[in-house]
Image (spheres, grey):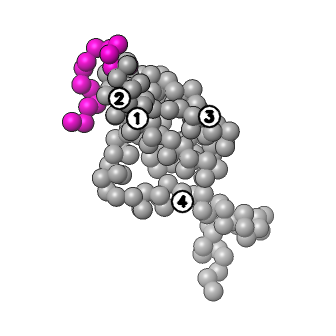
């Protein structure tokens, strides 16, 4: 039997074993997820989250460790994700790229909920930020200048 202190780095004096297990599991949510995904997927996630961080910096919110630090997601909101989507349109990103970026942000928002730093209510709102369906994308593209930014083809 492994002593509790070796598994759970928090003092068990003030917490139950279940609470300690929750603390331990929460502290490793991002790492556990990233260990399971393919290298190419992780690379895409790094790029997508870097773009989201760039957007946040652009609006005056510095977030440098969103890919690894769940705590950095504590003040991410539905409005920020929705504005990120619009910002990408304004920057000329391809519809498929925007959809991929939004999808990745939602994945990490969900992990932040699992880590206990983002509320379920806020995540429910973030989850409602939708990408563009094919027909919607065509309509949006017809109304904007073609720049080919973010186009992966």
The residue that mark 3 highlights is 125
Q: Nearer the viewer, residue 67 or 126?
A: 126
Q: Is residue 143 magenta?
A: yes
Along the viewing direction, whichever of 32 and 101 lies nearer the viewer: 101
Q: 23 left or right of 51?
A: right
Q: Is residue 49 above or below residue 144?
A: below
Cα distance between the residues tagged 4 and 3: 24 Å
Q: Nearer the viewer, mark 2 or mark 3?
A: 2
Q: Nearer the viewer, residue 41 or 25?
A: 41
Q: Which residue is mark 1?
A: 99
Q: Which circle, 2 or 4, is nearer the viewer?
A: 2
Pick whichever of labels 2 and 3 is earlier in the sequence.
Answer: 2
Circle 1: element type = helix
Secondary element type, mark 4: loop
State the SS at label 2.
helix
How many marks the image carries: the answer is 4
In the image, residue 9 above or below residue 95: below
**Image position of 90 with respect to 120: above or below:** above
Camera sees residue 143: yes
Q: Position of residue 66 (x, y in %)?
A: 47, 43
Disc 1 vs disc 2: Cβ atoms closer than 8 Å? yes
CB atoms of marks 2 and 3 within 8 Å: no
Q: Residues within 10 Å of mark 3 (few under 14, many from 20)?
A: some
- Residue at (24% x, 20% y) in the render: 147
The tag earlier along the polypeptide, 1 or 4, is 4
CA gap, disc 1 to disc 4? 27 Å
Q: Position of residue 79 (x, y in %)?
A: 57, 26
Question: Which range of residues does the magenta coloring cover?
Answer: 140-153
**Main secondary structure found in the magenta portion:** loop
Q: Which residue is identified by label 4?
A: 28
Say the numbered circle drawn on residue 95: 2
């Amino acid at each position: 039997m492994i002593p509790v202190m070796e598994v759970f780095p928090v003092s068990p004096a003030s917490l139950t074993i279940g609470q300690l297990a929750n603390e331990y599991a929460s502290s490793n949510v991002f790492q556990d997820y990233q260990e399971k995904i393919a290298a190419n997927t992780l690379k895409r996630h790094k790029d997508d989250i870097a773009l989201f961080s760039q957007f946040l910096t652009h609006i005056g919110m510095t977030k440098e460790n969103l890919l690894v630090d769940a705590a950095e997601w504590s003040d991410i909101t539905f409005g920020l994700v929705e504005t990120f989507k619009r910002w990408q349109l304004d920057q000329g990103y391809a519809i498929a790229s925007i959809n991929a970026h939004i999808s990745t942000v939602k994945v990490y928002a969900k992990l932040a909920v699992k880590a206990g730093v983002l509320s379920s209510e806020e995540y429910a709102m973030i989850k409602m930020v939708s990408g563009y369906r094919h027909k919607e994308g065509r309509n949006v593209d017809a109304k904007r200048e073609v720049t080919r930014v973010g186009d992966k083809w």
